[in-house]
Image (cartoon, helix red, strand yellow):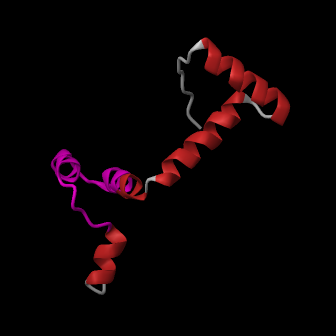
Amino acid sequence: MHRLNLTIDETLYEQARAVSFIEKKSISQIIRESLTEYLAKDTKTKQQAELLLEADDEKEILSILKNDEFTSNEDFKNKFNL
């Protein structure tokens, strides 16, 4: 796990604290769950992020970011029967 520092406004913190108390979860757990849900929503961005994480060099990363039309490794393998 990685430690992350973030700044939120007082109202949002108080709401998170109240929900944390009611649900008997830490604020960190609520943030992890919320971030996981947020990242799962946008499949195109999620696929693009996965391609970035798999990229071998800066040139490939820049190409992925520049190009809105991209193919995931799985789609490529299926298309060419690899």
Q: Is residue 67 magenta?
A: yes
Q: Residue at x 75, y 30 (%)?
A: 26
Dominant secondary-structure state across the stretch colored magenta: helix
Q: Residue at x 69, y 26 (%)?
A: 16
Would you say residue 78 is visible in this rendering?
Answer: yes
Extreme bottom residue here?
81
Quarter of image, res 32: top right
> Please, is residue 23 above or below residue 59 in the view?
above
Q: Answer with left or right where residue 70 lies relative to residue 10.
A: left
Q: Residue at x 57, y 15 (%)?
A: 9
In x, y percent, where is residue 72?
32, 66
Would you say residue 24 is visible in this rendering?
Answer: no
Q: Residue at x 15, y 48 (%)?
A: 59
Instruction: Please state the extent of the stretch shown in magenta in the rendering.
Output: 48-72
Q: Answer with left or right where residue 30 lies relative to residue 20.
A: left
Q: Is residue 68 magenta?
A: yes
Quarter of image, res 78: bottom left
In x, y percent, where is residue 79?
28, 82
Image quadrant occupied by the C terminus: bottom left
Extreme top residue here?
10
Counting the numbered discs, the total is 0
In x, y percent, where is residue 70?
24, 62
> Please, is residue 44 above or below residue 79 in the view?
above
